[in-house]
Image: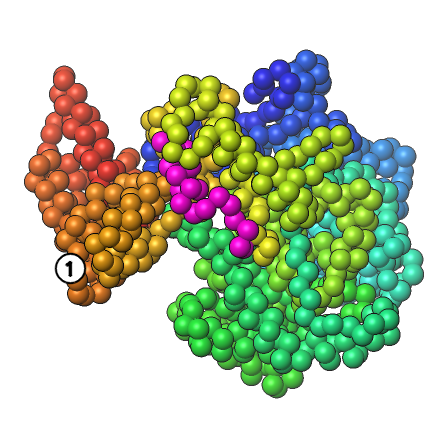
Amino acid sequence: ISNGTHTKYYSNTTRFSHVKEIAEGERKKSKKTSNSFEFTSYWADGNNKPITDLIDFTRTFFARHTILAILARYCVFTSENLLMVMRPYQIAATERILSRIENSHNREKVGTIEAGGYIWHTTGSGKTLTSFKTAQLACGLPYIDKVLFVVDRKDLDYQTMKEYDRFQKGAANSNASTRILAGQLQRSDARIIITTIQKLDRFVSMNKSHEIYKKHVVIIFDECHRSQFGDMHIQIVKSFKNYHLFGFTGTPIFAANAGSSGNPLMRTTEQAFGDKLHTYTIVDAINDGNVLPFRIDYIDTVRMRDGVVDINVHAIDTERAMADEGRIREVVRYILEHFDQKTKRNSFYSLEGQRVSGFNSILAVSSIPVAKMYYKILKEQLAESGRELKVATIFSYNANEADPEDLLPDENFDTARLDKSSRDFLEEAIADYNALFGTNFDTSADKFQSYYKDLSMRMKKREVDLLVVVNMFLTGFDATTLNTLWVDKNLRLHGLIQAFSRTNRILNSVKTFGNIVCFRNLEEATDKAIALFGNREAGGIVLLKSYQDYYAGYDEKGKHHPGYIELIEKLRTDFPPGVQIVGEDSQKDFIRLFGAILRLRNILTAFDDFEGNKIPTERDFQDYQSRYIDLHQSFTKEQNAEKEKINDDLVFEMELIKQIEVNIDYILRLVERYRKSNSKDRREIRVNIAKAVDSSIRLRSKKELIEGFVDRMTVSGNVEEDWKQFVSEQKEKELNSLIETEKLKPEKTQKFVENALRDGILRTTGTDIDGILPPISRFTITGERARIKDGVINKLLVFFEKYFGAA
């Protein structure tokens, strides 16, 4: 796909699935997926420099060797019959590893550090697919007997196996025990094996001599940044004689962040694995749009005495102050007051067929005692305010919990060594979780691991709002619904980037950055980490600009970027409130300008300073929104929740409109004021109700319903209860009329509509929709059945838009 200047490539599945999604016409909010334009790829050279020009792209991408390699080697036809094509940096990394295997084999360097190397690909860049293709192609080499893919946690081998199975069913072998691993290592047909470093270490300890040690093997370590720098790593490479050792990491250990503990010859990634073979940093990923940048708030909760600058000297006193119950209560109050703002709880979208509001978050704290205090106070303050947030916590024993180097200790599932108070507390917290979700977990070894997996799944589905952790979930956990990390612990270098990166997975247009809220001064640590894992100039790419830059505008590299105030002034000047926008060119100018304002406003709402500085007035902004929606409806027949390309040169930001629009609760508050007001004020409030409804995509379809309710409003009664009753009566009356007019099957239609309103999706294809239609032959010459079906679907869609989310 190209316009001459910008050229991208994608698999046929991406296009076919995108067309299919549109054709199915499901009334649900889209998100950025592998079926959307955002997930097509730029072609690039080996140093990640994009090749965007059409002529340059054609010259390199369609070179005979390149196109054949992409088609034959670097596409994956998944078990779900989806075609995936690898990105340039994934291809480059795979080729570098295969080249290193080939060269070291030919030069008889097998079994040495020169036979391997490491791949530095930032968190979230798709290392699992790269490792899968590497393993698949490596085991196809005639002299390679086995490929071992080694992860550092038990849950990760389960996740990796699921991913490998998705890429190709049965391509790899996993193992629940060291005994099964031993059997797989003996079997010639088990070419690719996924295991944990703990199981592999136990196998080596229990089998001092084994025929596998003489075999030609490729060993790939995932996230090779921490646990492998110890005795286990040394033991494994001592036992195997003919190996190629490779590591994948998003945050390598360099001399600057190596620490001083452990074997001095095994402290850095390069010492353990050899040369760096390929790099794709967080800066590359953000520039390519594969992950999001970070927006960081520093909230001052403890004032240090003047002159106190050495955190290590005063660490004990500082930690005591940080763990003060009064301070933690203030932090919790801040979190709850700003929770909706940071996690964008006014924004709705569809996730796996469910309608959900906003995103979720993790609170990372310094120790288990502090985690217990936070959980307890969160529960207390939520109960006092009557709010219903789903809060959970998880922690386990770790000897290095207070690691002075803050390199995030490895996750483990050891609860047996927790002190009695901590284990009892964890039991109670898991009991709270069981009560919330109808589960049956506890702190016993097996059930605690099941709790971890269930909690991980519910975080990904946005069923848990806030998770309190010490170290768990801060590395290796990916959830696109997670947008905020609240930080009350010291992080630095590798640990900081790993923790922050939990928030920067792409989901939709509303999620434009990962939100980091620090209750400790981590500014210097953040700058150092970004410089180490990006470059010295990376801060401008990895971190968002300041509030003042977005609000007032800024200059960068000789170009002026207008701020929110400037754009609003231009809006008022070029398109005054109440004046009609005439002519297509003017309308397009308005669409582009208001779209830019919506994008800036979406970023600014994350800043506390924006509250109280919002311009224009709410009423004027609603007027502009109404015009924007009017133009969207006139330019396109079918609304789409995602960014929508119109005439190839317009982008409607409908997803951003939907996150700032008014809702039914807002309208009902206006109705309550209308009911209590005198006749003079009533006219003004009625106008406000009409303006608010017109400015909302969702409420426009409910305009007739809202006006009917206002017309029959009585002076007494409860507005909310009266509204629910009114909606219920009107819904039943209208549905019965539709069933009668279209001769639909009553019970099946009522069930069909009930399911649609519950799930937030009206499915217009499949057996359910066919099952409600009147009996008509499928084989009429006139095509009567198709005509009747289309008519019914259109009426049901109008009904659905009117009543979905109304009460």
**Residue 780: percent from the left, percent from the top?**
13, 21
- Which quadrant would residue 164 be assigned to in this image? top right
Above or below: residue 728 compared with residue 370: above
Above or below: residue 267 compared with residue 118: below
Instruction: Residue at the far front: name it.
Output: 680
Work out which quarter of the rendered image holds the N terminus and state it.
top right
Tell whether position 617 is magenta: yes
Residue underneath mark 1: 714
Q: Nearer the viewer, residue 654 or 352?
A: 654
Decide if residue 1 is on the left or right side of residue 316.
left
Tell me if I can see residue 677 in this picture. yes
Q: Over which residues does the magenta segment extend? A: 611-630
Tell me if I can see residue 215 in this picture. no
Q: Residue at x 38, y 49 (%)?
A: 662
**Residue 599: percent from the left, percent from the top?**
54, 39
Q: Nearer the viewer, residue 646 or 79?
A: 646
**Residue 303: percent from the left, percent from the top?**
74, 72
Magenta stretch secondary structure, dominant: helix
Q: Residue at x 60, y 55 (%)?
A: 609
Q: Residue at x 62, y 75 (%)?
A: 328
Q: Secondary structure at mark 1?
A: loop
Kind of residue indicated by mark 1: Thr
